[in-house]
Each structure stands twice: as structure tokens, then as C-alpha cells.
Image: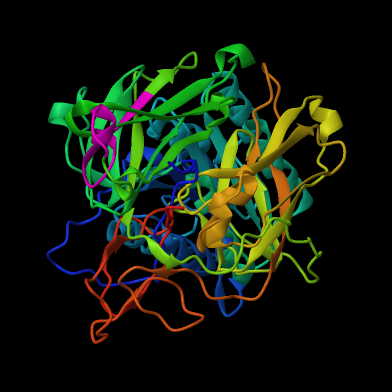
Amino acid sequence: MPRLSTLTAALTAVALTVLPASLPAPAKADPGQYAPTMLILDASGSMERPDQGGTMMDAAKRAVRSFVASAPAESSVGLTTYGTGTSNSEADKAAGCRDVQVLQQPKTIDKPALTAAVDGIHARGWTPMGTALRQAADALPDSGPRSIVLVSDGDDTCSPPDPCEVAKELKQQGLDLIVHSIGFAVDDKARAQLTCMAQATGGTYSDAADGAALERILPRVSSAALRNYQATGTPITGTDEYRTAPVAKPGQYLDTIGQRQKRFYAVDVPAGATAYFTGIVSFPRQKDISQSEDMNALELRIFGRDGIDCNIRERELGGSASDGVALTVAKAFDGAAEEPTGGNSAKCKGGGRYYFELNWDLVSKGSPARLPIEVLVGIEPGVTDPGPAAATTPVTFTDPAGTPQPITGGGSFTVASTLQGSGNYSDTVQPGEYVFYRVRLDWGQGLAYRVRFAETDGVKYGTAANVATSLYSPLGREIDSDTTVYTGTSSTELTLASVPVRYANRENSDAQVERASVAGWYYLAVKLGSPGGAETMPPTPVQLDLTVSGTPEPGPTYIGVSAEPGTQQPVAVSDSPTVSKPWTVYVLIGAGVALIVGIGTAIFVVARRRA
């Protein structure tokens, strides 16, 4: 039997906007997977100042509408405002400094209601920023990550309470709350106050010189505030023994798993085909967990007919779980491509029903009793021609020229932000965040990239954190990673590179070569760890410098599927006489759980070829 590859496989497809009505709808993400976020919008009288053909209030409303339109349907977003109930005269100051209204609670976003609430705001009163900050924090959930995004055109005119002191108090109470502030055409005094609020909670401060800048900045900052790991998939419930395991067809599923609990799933694997199975768990961010108590492990085992142990297992160990690590375990199974020879071992060969067991068998301190787990299944045919020989030399990094393009990374594989090939990209990462990006690689292409963590006021904060970057295959399997200690006193760089993507790479003994064996979306994760103890670290600007190298080339030829040279494989075309059957495939990581029937649709397929 050939060596079983530890590389799993994904099926990546061209984007579709319409799904057949008979197919199951994708499961909705748990709203808790986004950080509940409260927008605080300044409606003091000064927001009636002119700005680009309208008023500053008009520009702020447009910026909020833009964010609301783009916010995920599963996110929780609320709206607070101040200054709408009184004038800004001295006679109204006492009432005006109590004039804070929570217009929308931070529940699952109701876009029409939120937009209507924004449209109904009229700027006229005072600026009780500190009071608004307290009330917004009170309206957010009592536990878990939370965010506030505050837009103001000036400093607090009602202190006390001083908004910076309020922000410090909230952080001292141990709240997992981050405040992001945006200064809209502010002076130095207001800028200092808004910056202090953000820094006190580990948030960001952004300057918006005019309405056009605010319309660019607010959606980006608000999206970053919502950013958290989003587990997605069609609901499935694994069982504690194989006999009752649910049958999982190719696709992406969402289950939950308990500490040291086993979950079984059944997969029907046709003779000659290869099965791919992946489990992904994201661990919540926590504080003050020692390194020795901060480890988790996922184990994957495969069982054959009648529950026979095939002695095929994969175990992945993940440290720094308290930083919000996403841990993946994956396996490619080609036993169905072998002929049964008799005895119990025959039950692990040939076509039939197989069972995949996931086990969260090492648990870090403070972990929840249960966590969401994403389960990915792929089935595909063999190949008649694997295409070009394996590539074993990583591509060379070439520093792209040009101004960095601002981009907001996603909180998971599923919502990773797309990098449009070679270029420079910029983002801001919060302490304790994992941020995901994706880039498309065709057959014959590889990538090399550099992550630069900018110098910040590290001396002032007097602390350090681990920074890391990881490169993942299209099904979330880690290809390589790099990590170091970052203090902020100087810029820090991390670099990674892959070999060109070739189908034949999977037969190589080097894991970094083996795992770059499928064309599709590759994922870059960037991490800024949480500093230890009570120390804080400011949000950190990062720059991704990316090189995509190589000319696209023909991929493998799959059994029963014809394709023109240079196209991705397999291509099932309904009027092609050489297609023996339409292969049913799924869009997995990076595109949700949309089922795609391969009729007239060009698709990428990850395969494991029998030697």
C-alpha cells in the first residue's frame, strides 16, 4: 500500500450566485461568532458644519449606511447616539449632557431598522461622550469579546465623566471590550482624547479629515471590530459510536464537540475514489493562561466496515489556544482504491462505508465544555495523468512595488479577505487576533510573502507578545509557519514561501512540498498574540508583501472527465460524450457550503492519486 498522504484535499469552484432550489441551504453562523458591536455616532450641534456639499452629519450617515449594507447578516450591531434631544445652548447643557439614546440594541443586525434609525438622527446638542461610552458598554453582552466604534467631531463637552477615564475603568473591570475611535475633522485636543480612549482598551484610532475619508474608514474599522472566527456549515450531529453515525456526503458541516468527546461520521466511498476528511475547531481568546496549560489536540481516526480500526490516524497539537488559535486535523484516505484481499484488513479496502472519528483529546485550561467544530468531507475520482513532475524548490520572493492597499482581514477561513495576487496590502491587527486572507493559485503557481509588524510605542507599554504567520492549503491544512517575539520597539518581519502547485507534489516525502498539491485558494493567517499578565499592547499596523510566481499550466487528468489543455480539472460539460457521469462537488473553505453539480461548470478538485 502506498504511503498515505497527510495532505487533505478541498474542492474549490468558481463563484456562483444562484443555487438550485432543491439543495439544502447553508447553515447560518452562530451570531456569537461575531463580536457584538455598538456604533456610537456623534450628533452634537457641531456635526451640522458643512462638508463637501452637505453637512458632516450627512457624511456620517452615508458612512454608517455603507457599513450596514456590507455587515454580515449574522453579526450583532447596535447604534447609540448623543446630542439629538436638546440644543447646544448653555441653558440646555444639564439636559444635553444626559442626552444619550440607544437607538438599536446590539442584537442580530436588522439592516432596514438600523438604516432607518440612522436616517432619523438630527444633530443639535452637546457631546456627553463619556456617558455614551458607559451606556453603550452596558447595552453590550455581559461576557465574551465586544466592540465599540465611536465617531466624533470633537472632544467631550460634558466631562465628567472623562471618556478616557471611562475607557480605563471598563478595561480594569476585566471586560473583553475594545473601543475603536474615529476623529472626524478634529483638532489636537479631541484627537488626544479619542486616541486615549482607544489605547486604553487596545483599540485603534483613525483620522478622517473629511466626509469622503470617513466613508472609507468607518466600514473598515467597523468590520475589524466585528472580526471573530466564524464557524459555518450544514448542521450535523456526530455520535459517540460508529453504528449510529450520520452519513455525510461531500460538503461542509457544523457540529459541536465536548471535551475529550469522540464524534463519529459515516462516509460512503466509491471503489477507486479518494476520501478527504477535515475537522476545524477555533478556541476562544482567554487571558492569563500559562503556556503549559494552553495546549489542545484534535485526533482523527478512520474505521472500516463493521467498525474495524484501519490503524490510520492523524493528531494535531496546538499551543497558544488562548490567543484564539484555529486548530485543524485532516486526512486523505485512499483505501477504496485498493482491492480487498481477505481478513479484517479487507474491511479497510475497496468501496464501501467508512467511519471517521474526531476526538478533542487534549484540553487547555479554561476551555468551554463544548465548542463548534467544522467538518469537511470530499470525494473524488482517480487520475489517468497526474500532469507535470513534482516541484521541490520554493518560489522566490520579489518585493512588489507600489502603495499598500488597505484591506480588512477576516476572522476565519470562511470569511478570509481576498488578496488580488502580487502586491502590497496593509491592515491593523489587535492583540489576541488571528486574521485570515486568501490568494488564488493555479496549477504551476506558488507564492512567497512577508509580513511586517510595524514599530509602535512598545517602550511605553513595556511588554512583548508572540507574532506568527501560517500558510494553509485549500482545506485548512497548515503548510508552514513562522513565529517570533514582538515588542513594538522596532519593526518585525516574518516570511514564508511555497513550492509551485503540482498534483505530483503529494507523493513527495517533504510535507511542505506534499501539501502544495492542489490548485485553489491558499490561506494566510497573521497572529498578534496577547501579552501576558496585565500588560497591554497597542493595535499593530501590519503590511503583507505578496509575490505570486509561475505561469498557469495544465493540471491532472481525471478518470471519466475530459478537459482542454490549460483548464482546471475536472471539467464536467453536459454535452461532452467523454464524460461518464457528472461529478458532484462542493465549494468548501472560503466559499461557504454551496453545493455545485458539475454540469458546465469549471471546477478545481483536490485529489489523492493511487501510486
* Quadrant of the rendering where the N terminus is positioned: top left
Q: Farthest front residue?
A: 341
Q: Picture coordinates of residue 298 (x, y %)?
A: 43, 27
Q: Is residue 316 above or below residue 571?
A: above
Corner quadrant of residue 141: top left
User: Is 570 included in the stretch rendered in magenta?
Assistant: no
Q: Please say whether residue 45 is visible from this viewpoint.
A: no
**Camera-nearest residue between 60 and 230:** 230
**Camera-nearest residue between 414 and 204:** 414
* Residues drawn in magenta: 341-359
Q: Is residue 211 above or below residue 450?
A: below
Q: Picture coordinates of residue 383 (x, y %)?
A: 40, 64
Left or right relative to 595: residue 525: right
User: Is 348 included in the stretch rendered in magenta?
Assistant: yes
Q: Picture coordinates of residue 481 (x, y %)?
A: 66, 41
Left or right relative to 39: residue 600: left
Q: Is residue 344 above or below residue 3?
A: above
Left or right relative to 275: residue 609: right
**Camera-nearest residue between 285 and 395:** 395
Q: Residue at x 31, y 26 (%)?
A: 257
Q: Residue at x 34, y 18 (%)?
A: 369
Q: Picture coordinates of residue 77 (x, y %)?
A: 39, 47
Left or right relative to 119: residue 579: left
**Camera-nearest residue between 29 and 585:** 585
